[in-house]
Amino acid sequence: MKVRTRSSAILGTICLVGSLALGPASADEPAAPKQAAVALTEVATAQNPVAGAAGPDDTVWIAERAGTVRVLTGQGLGEPVLDISAETTTDGERGLLGVAFDNDFAHFYVSYTNLEGTSTIDEFAVQDGALQPDTRRTVLTQTQPYENHNGGDIKFGPDGYLYIALGDGGAGGDPQGNGQKLDTLLGKILRIDPAGAEPYAIPSDNPFVGDPNAKDEIWSYGLRNPWRFSFDSGTGDLLIGDVGQSDWEEIDWSPASSEGGENYGWASMEGTHPFRGGTEPANHVPPVFEYDRNGLGCSVTGGYVYRGDAIPDLQGQYIYSDYCDGTLRTLKIENGTVTGQGDLAVNGGEVISFVQGGDGELYVLGLGGSISRIDAA
């Protein structure tokens, strides 16, 4: 995330700066896949909704940036089931930034910046679909040197482990070099087992376990601000929307068979391009897709591969957007190669996040307050 500077401040809202012109067109650009006809159906409004997760009993839980969590049902958005607004700050790009359930809905996790700006992951037990406040415990913390690039997304992978996205620490250009350093958790995707120990265990097959010069929690590195990532519920593949610095937005991909350790290049690289004279690392894993800032975009918002039933023509396509552009777009990815690009011809406003319901249907969160479901037109 990065503060949107093209219109000065953002009046207390959060902004993720990256870009979006949608890949320079070329003669060999992948053809558009068969495009689905879709519409956005507003199902609720919230105060700065920033993240969400599929919950028990076909509910969707929505996080509001200031620190509240509400449950979306067929009747709309309920009263807060959690309020940590007195414990978080919304300065810069901070706030309640991510929520997740474990794979059997036995625990609920929140990712937020506390009053000191420290990235914090807390856990609550869940019983009969309700949070148990007295079970709250802190799983992981990470000091943030600046107010931006916190990352903050959290997801449980198909393997049952908790994956955590942390940005490079902020400012601009990664002044501390955290993206390429393996002795810090910043600029990384982490993989931990919160059920394995107090406060958590390290999976024995994490790629840097046993390396005295690296943090055992690291799954992949070389990331600037991986604001939103997801697992394809059909294949288990991992997709990361990493917000760019000046010129390029990128989407990174790794297969379900990955053993981790991917280096996505930041801050030596911005997408496939050397950043400020940087040298491409020998182990650089280039993005599966990138786009420049010659259009309206400024900050990629990673989404999901659609696996719902309501829109058959959308099956298997990765849906993403951009905070400044707001258009919903698609990629068809086959074995790590983009074979098609599409435009759904709908606009979600300041698209800050996507949420995948338990039925595979997708919701779009606009920071201004809208919560919309992607429906067949």
Image: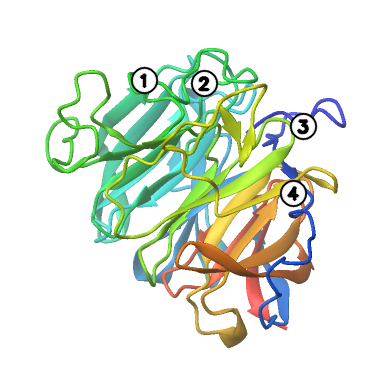
Q: Secondary structure at mark 1?
A: loop
Residue 8: image location, x then y, percent: 85, 26
- The residue tagged 2 is 169
**Residue 241, image x, y percentages:** 56, 47
Give SS at disc 3: loop
Kind of residue at disc 2: Gly
Please indicate whether residue 297 sits to the left or right of residue 67 in the image.
right
- Mark 2 nearby-residue class (10 Å; few <14, some 14–19, many ≥20): many
Q: Which numbered disc flags the more N-terminal residue, 3 or 4?
A: 3
Left/right of residue 191 with respect to residue 70 in the rendered view: left
Q: Quote the CA–CA distance across marks 1 and 4.
A: 32 Å
Are the two marked residues, 1 and 2, in contact with CB atoms closer than 8 angstroms? yes
| Residue found 56% across the figure and 68% down from its top | 362
**Quick one: label 3 or label 1, which is nearer the N terminus?**
3
Local crowd size for mark 4, using a 10 Å CA cut-off: few (<14), some (14–19), many (≥20)? many
- Give the CA separation, mark 3 to mark 4: 11 Å
- Name the mark nearer the viewer: 3 or 1: 1
Q: Nearer the viewer, residue 140 or 49?
A: 140
Which x, y percent locates residue 318? 56, 66
Of tags 1 and 4, the one toward the viewer is 1
What amino acid is at disc 3? Arg
Task: Give me the C-alpha separation between circle 3 and circle 1.
Answer: 27 Å
Which residue corresponds to mark 1?
184
Query: In the rendered view of the protein, which quadrant contains the N terminus?
Result: top right
Circle 4 SS class = loop
Element under disc 2 = loop
Question: Mark 4 highlights which residue?
Answer: 350
**The image quarter in which residue 127 lies:** bottom left
Mark 1 / mark 2, whichever is N-terminal: 2
Q: Please identify, in this view, whether the residue under mark 3 or under mark 4 is nearer the observer.
A: 3
**Which residue does the numbered mark 3 point to in the structure image?**
4
